[in-house]
């Protein structure tokens, strides 16, 4: 539905900030929101809007078209995620107790019948170290290359590959544990 | 829509396979992780709807069309202004320009206010200093100087013109006033001791005219008209006697004053007797 705008931008090949912004939103809003959700940010939809609002003033100095916008977008999203965790460390927010979100309870028969759904992936991710979660979110959800992931995380490409391998291994172990416990 | 979903699903599967191949994962392990990774990947397929601020920055595309559809039957449609204009990017640029202009004007205004406040403070300090030393004429003079300095600061183009005329106006006046008020200084110190500091209480009539003009006593200030404050400055040049009073300066020679008082040290050096 929104692809014609992106195609129009790619075919036009000119530097119109509004057109580039629209194409970037239509193309990358979902991955940005999914990345923030995978990293456990509260209210990922609102933070996604903030990320795109922070992108717009930088479009004049942006190089690389949509691909450059993608890298810049996830850099901003990564910074927002880091800010979120720092803020949470300084001032933990009190959360009310809700039975539905309590992960210590046993799954109901309905949950067991229809599967754990996205909550299962969330549980798997929450048990991983931060670096593992970050590399999985950037590589799987955001669909970034190894080079772009290394640039955003501030690591070398070899370190990112190694980290990705370990993260996948840890995820596999946890998945096996979960399947075995079920 | 289903074609697009299937195409996206296929793209996701290919991306996950590529990722696992890059990670050197064995084909036996794929079954355990692949479904979780696909599930994780599906989080990116649901974009949130743009907020109003984001929609305002977007080009008048699908978002503008939807806003036009929602507002077409409302009262805004009667003004025949296309709704897509509201979604253009021109508004943030003009807002930024207005903000910059307003900030610059605010900065200029703040500088002028700060300069005025500094000048007023300096003028107040100078006035207080003059009131404590020179009396009311000096106060008037210092107020004039302060106004001149303020005008000099506020109008930088004519900054040197008042400074050249300043010494000609200010320097001759304070000196005679200070000379005239110096003899009255001890009388000012004794004034609180006197219960009624009127002109008749002073035994010496010569000190009254100079003191009446230069004394900042609380009783004298209401009597003096502020418009006539410059009058006492001309007679200050010499202690002139009042016109109605006849002084006995002529009788002064009658007082027997020794022509050359005999000072013991001036008598002369005793000469030593010759050997």
Image (tube, coloured by chain):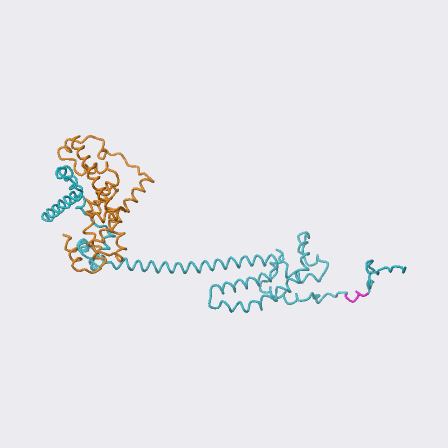
Chain colours: A orange, B cyan
Q: Is residue B252 magenta?
A: yes
Is A117 positioned to the left or the right of A150 in the image? left
Q: Main secondary structure of the magenta part?
A: loop
Find out whether residue B196 is within the magenta segment. Answer: no
Horizontal and vertical percent position of residue B192: 66, 52
> Within the image, what quadrant is residue B100 found in?
bottom left
Q: Nearer the viewer, residue A4 or B259?
A: A4
Q: Nearer the viewer, residue A126 or A19?
A: A126
Q: Quadrant of residue A16?
A: bottom left
Q: Quadrant of the C terminus of chain A?
A: top left
In this rendering, position of residue A83 left or right of residue B238? left
- Residue B49, image x and y in percent? 20, 49
Q: Quadrant of residue B165?
A: bottom right
* Residue A177, placed above or below residue B201: above
Q: Position of residue A109 (x, y in %)?
A: 14, 31
- Residue that sits furthest to the left in the current view: B3
Is residue B72 in view from this perspective? no
Q: Position of residue A27 (x, y in %)?
A: 18, 51
Residue drawn 18% across the image and 60% down it: A13
Residue B22 visible in the shown view:
yes
B174 w.r.t. A126: above or below: below
Residue nearer the viewer, B8 or A153:
A153
Does residue B76 lie above or below B230 as drawn?
Answer: above
B73 left or right, relative to B174: left
Query: B210 or A73: which is nearer to us?
Result: A73
Residues rendered magenta in the picture: B249-253
Count of marks, rendered view: 0
Which residue is drawn at the image coordinates 42% and 58% (left, top)? B110
């Amino acid at each position: 539905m929104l692809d014609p705008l992106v195609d129009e931008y790619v075919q036009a090949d000119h530097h119109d900030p509004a057109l580039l912004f629209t194409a970037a939103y239509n193309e990358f809003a979902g991955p940005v929101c999914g990345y923030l959700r995978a990293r456990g940010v509260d209210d990922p939809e609102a933070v996604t809007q903030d990320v795109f609002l922070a992108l717009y003033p930088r479009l004049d100095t942006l190089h690389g078209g949509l691909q450059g916008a993608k890298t810049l977008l996830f850099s901003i999203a990564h910074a927002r995620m880091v800010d979120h965790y720092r803020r949470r460390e300084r001032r933990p927010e009190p959360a009310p107790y809700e039975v539905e979100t309590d992960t210590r309870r046993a799954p109901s028969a309905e949950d067991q019948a229809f599967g754990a759904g996205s909550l299962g992936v969330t549980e798997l991710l929450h048990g991983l170290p931060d670096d593992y979660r970050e590399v999985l979110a950037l590589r799987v959800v955001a669909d970034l290359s190894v080079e772009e992931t290394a640039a955003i995380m501030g690591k070398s490409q070899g370190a990112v590959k190694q980290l990705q391998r370990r993260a996948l291994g840890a995820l596999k172990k946890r998945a096996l544990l979960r399947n075995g416990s079920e | 829509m289903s074609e697009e979903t299937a195409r996206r699903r296929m793209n996701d599967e290919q991306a996950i396979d590529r990722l696992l191949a890059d990670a050197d994962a064995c084909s036996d392990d794929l079954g355990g992780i692949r479904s979780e990774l696909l599930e994780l990947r599906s989080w990116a397929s649901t974009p949130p709807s743009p907020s109003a601020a984001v929609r305002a920055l977007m080009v008048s595309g699908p978002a503008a069309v939807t806003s036009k559809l929602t507002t077409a039957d409302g009262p805004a449609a009667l003004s025949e202004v296309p709704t897509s204009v509201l979604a253009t990017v021109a508004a943030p640029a003009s807002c930024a320009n207005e903000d910059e202009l307003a900030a610059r004007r605010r900065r200029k205004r703040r500088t002028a206010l700060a300069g005025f406040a500094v000048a007023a403070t300096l003028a107040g300090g100078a006035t207080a200093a003059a009131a404590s030393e020179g009396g009311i004429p000096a106060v008037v003079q210092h107020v004039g100087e302060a106004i001149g300095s303020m005008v000099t600061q506020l109008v930088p183009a004519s900054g040197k013109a008042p400074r050249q005329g300043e010494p000609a106006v200010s320097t001759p006046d304070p000196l005679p006033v200070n000379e005239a008020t110096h003899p009255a200084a001890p009388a000012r110190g004794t004034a609180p001791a006197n219960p009624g500091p009127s002109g008749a209480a002073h035994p010496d009539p010569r000190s009254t005219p100079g003191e009446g003009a230069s004394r900042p006593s609380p009783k004298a200030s209401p009597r003096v008209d502020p418009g006539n404050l410059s009058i006492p400055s001309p007679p200050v040049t010499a202690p002139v006697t009042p016109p109605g009073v006849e002084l006995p300066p002529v009788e002064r020679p009658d007082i027997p004053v020794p022509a050359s008082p005999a000072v013991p040290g001036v008598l002369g050096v005793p000469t030593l007797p010759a050997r």
